[in-house]
Amino acid sequence: MKKDFLSIRDLSAEDCFVLFNQAEEMKARTRRREPYRPLEGRTLGMLFTKRSTRTRVSFEVGMFQLGGHALFLSAQDIQMGKSETISDTARVLSRFLDAIMIRTFDHADVQELSHSATIPVINGLTDLLHPCQVMSDLFTWYEVHHSLEGVRITYIGDGNNMANSWINAAAVLPIQLTIACPAGYEPDAGVLAAAREVSAHPIRITQDVHAAARDTDILYTDVWASMGQEEEAAVRRERMKDYRIDQTVVELASPECMVMHCLPAHRGDEITDEVIDGPRSVVFEEAENRLHMQKAILVSLMRPGV
Ligand code: CP
Ligand code: NVA
């Protein structure tokens, strides 16, 4: 693995499968309550300029369970970006910590942090990407089927950081990705063009939700207005109202399909209660898997080879 994990494009297919298998081991150990403390004496700094439940808790609990310590550093409380440059913060934190996880708005800020930090930097979500989430989502399929060959994934809704990360996954892994989104809300053009150059299967972008959902293995959605887009919420709700996973959409998919959502969900908008609480939904397994995948990523970056 590279020093940092900012994007799924930082990983090879082999790196991904190593992480899936490590996450599976982590999950089994956690379930058995078996002590496993390869990060004893090590500290992760967690920088947040956006809200979080799953990312914050899974990294913090993950570090504790691995024998290490996690430090929550809210943007309101530290100097970075206000009275100190990102680069100076990275150089100082590199002398105190063993790794940094950051959630923020501008992806370029994370790249700047990673450039100046001598310790691993993990992207805990930016406006552009959310790689830890998609690795957990892929693991949620992998732990059941132990293969990703040709798996059909249909992402419905806003072409946001989740959609972009799925595109990056399709660049690295042999999955078949279709994204159904309204005009004007397509995923990032640069991420898409770069992925299309190397992906094993065509990456499809369509406005036809029903055609995209037909026979698919994974139905995925996310909020129509992401953190930082609150003021656009009403306009987005109107533009995306036909890009929802409801029971009609689920019935078009494979009878064995998994319905996924990274959460938090806006029930009744991008996904109905019936679907999120229904028999094809794996959203809470997915949320739990954040913990196991985070632990795999933390150990791989902080103790490579262990
Ligand atoms: N899915 C996810 O990253 O959730 P949080 O925003 O709660 O961390
Ligand atoms: N697209 C959402 C994902 C939250 C986990 C956001 O960025 O707010």
Image (cartoon, rainbow, N blue to C red):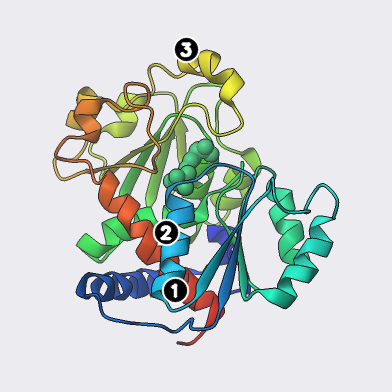
Question: Splitting the image into 4 quarters, where does residue 17 fall?
Answer: bottom left
Question: Is residue 177 found left or right of 3 in the rendered image?
Answer: left
Closest to the observer, 48 or 105? 48
**Mark sitting on residue 14:** 1
| SS at badge 3 | helix
Asked if the beta carbon under badge 2 is closer than 8 A to the nearest atom of ligand 1, the reply is yes
Gap in Å between the C-alphas at discs 1 and 3?
A: 42 Å
Gap in Å between the C-alphas at discs 1 and 2?
A: 24 Å
**Mark sitting on residue 58:** 2
- Looking at the rendered image, the disc whose residue lies closer to the viewer, 1 or 2, is 2
Q: Which residue is drawn at 54% across and 21% down?
A: 183
Considering the image in quadrants, where does the N terminus appear? bottom right
- Looking at the rendered image, the disc whose residue lies closer to the viewer, 3 or 2, is 2
Considering the image in quadrants, where does the C terminus appear? bottom left
User: Would you name the residue on which mark 3 appears?
Assistant: 238
Q: Which amino acid does label 2 sit on?
A: Ser
- Looking at the rendered image, the disc whose residue lies closer to the viewer, 1 or 3, is 3
Residue 4 % position (x, y): 62, 68
Q: What residue type is labelled 1?
A: Glu
Q: Which residue is drawn at 37% across and 22% down?
A: 269
Gap in Å between the C-alphas at discs 3 and 2?
A: 34 Å
Inspect this view and state whether residue 97 appears.
Answer: yes
Question: Is residue 43 found left or right of 291 in the rendered image?
Answer: right
Residue 88 % position (x, y): 83, 63
Asked if the beta carbon under badge 1 is closer than 8 A to the nearest atom of ligand 1, the reply is no
Q: Which residue is drawn at 41% across and 83% down?
A: 37
Q: In this view, does 272 lie above or below 126?
A: above
Residue 257 % position (x, y): 21, 43
Q: What residue type is labelled 3?
A: Glu
**Which badge, 3 or 2, is on the more N-terminal residue?**
2
**Which badge, 1 or 2, is on the more N-terminal residue?**
1
Question: Splitting the image into 4 quarters, where does residue 296 fall?
Answer: bottom left
